[in-house]
Image: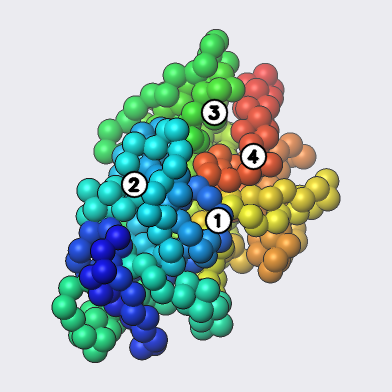
Amino acid sequence: MTDKPALLVLEDGTDFEGVAFGAIGETVGEAVFNTGMTGYQETLTDPSYHKQVVIATAPQIGNTGWNDEDDESSRIWVAGYVVRDPSPRPSNWRSKRSLEDELRAQGIVGIAGIDTRELTRHLRDQGAMRVGVSSLQTTKAALLAKVLESPSMAGANLIGDVTTKQPYVVPPKGERRLTVAAIDLGMKANTPRLMAARGMEVHVLPAASSFEDIAALQPDGVFFSNGPGDPATADDIMALIQQALNAGYPVFGICLGHQVFARALGLGTYKLRFGHHGINQPVKDLTTGRVAITAHNHGFAVAADGDMTSSFGQARVSHVCLNDDVVEGLELTRDGKLAGFSVQYHPEAAAGPHDAEHLFDRFADLMGEARHA
């Protein structure tokens, strides 16, 4: 870390002075705080954070350096990174280089040495907002002007930026039991890995794929991944989910996939005040009463309350967040049988707790039952 001055300015004019961390430059995005105590490498490479400047609430970041195994995609996706106290000497047997070295190599602008607790409390009070970070010679007024000119996350369609450009296959571990068409809206690498571990041959498809592309695979089910942006803009994905449901394919959606699944059932979505970003969110399963600690990254949520009827069957809220009662899961039944389900959180975690990993088993069971129906 250098002693080069850096500046952070929120769209309401609040500013913080610190030092440059990572690449020297200037960036803007939506300010979000992440409450994870660990897992910064997986967070930074999660495509769901595209166009967001991430604030780490953990006071010291970078202790374990950067390795070549834990990336969740091919690159760092965050627009910027804000930390309080970067570790000067990473220490981990898998570490290949420091966090700051990787940020510099990938051109990610950051700021360190600021009171991230004060910044987080401000965002909790005032709500998520646009932010600028600069380690160039600039003024607060000039950086604020650039922040105010930048687009809002509301109305942003970012799926095309992060989806795979070409289809690819993740082969099953051992014998192939099931075939899954996985629509990549910003998928993390651990998702197809966990499905493959359950005997699924996972065909990862670009978000622009047609229903004919899906049907050509003769899959046992269709999966819709996490991703960035406003679900209200994902009309093509919503139509694809509806086509899959009409064709009788079991459907499973997570995060952005959950939100668009809800829209396909006729429900709405809305922007949260400051969202859920971290790996310690308590979620209650309304069927069993069990509570899971789960990984989240979302600034939008589903507007639903109780049971509802859709053109595809009966839908109900299956999970809620115990912090704020946000809808965390939906189930769709047709003729008394489960036809599809979704969760707002990340069952693949990476990083995060493994409490929700069983949902991939549930998807496998659903596809198996549909195959033998």
- Mark 2 or mark 3, earlier in chain: 2
Of the numbered discs in the image, which one, if any, rests on residue 225?
none
Spatial distance from mark 3 to mark 1, Cα to Cα? 25 Å
Mark 2 neighbour density, 10 Å: few (under 14) some (14–19) many (20 or more): many
Mark 1 neighbour density, 10 Å: few (under 14) some (14–19) many (20 or more): many
In this orientation, does residue 141 appear? yes
In this orientation, does residue 156 appear? no
Query: Outermost residue, left direction?
Result: 137
Q: Amino acid at mark 3?
A: Met
Q: Nearer the viewer, mark 1 or mark 2?
A: 2
- Mark 1 or mark 2, earlier in chain: 1
Up-down relation of residue 119 to residue 161 (above or below) = below
Tell me the residue at 49%/42% (across/down). 224
In the foreground, 79 or 191: 79
Quadrant in which the N terminus is drawn = bottom left
Tell me the residue at 34%/36% (across/down). 96
Spatial distance from mark 1 to mark 4, Cα to Cα? 14 Å
Q: Which residue is mark 1?
A: 36
Tell me the residue at 55%/22% (across/down). 197
Query: Outermost residue, front direction?
Result: 89
Spatial distance from mark 2 to mark 3, Cα to Cα? 31 Å
Q: Which residue is mark 4?
A: 354
- Mark 3 or mark 4, earlier in chain: 3
Instruction: Mark 1 and mark 4 in contact? Answer it, CB < 8 Å.
Output: no
Q: Which residue is mark 3?
A: 195
Mark 3 neighbour density, 10 Å: few (under 14) some (14–19) many (20 or more): many
Label 2: state its secondary structure: loop
Spatial distance from mark 2 to mark 4, Cα to Cα? 27 Å
Spatial distance from mark 3 to mark 4, Cα to Cα? 14 Å
Q: Position of residue 343 (x, y in %)?
A: 61, 49
Q: Nearer the viewer, mark 1 or mark 4?
A: 1
Of the numbered discs in the image, which one, if any, rests on residue 98?
2
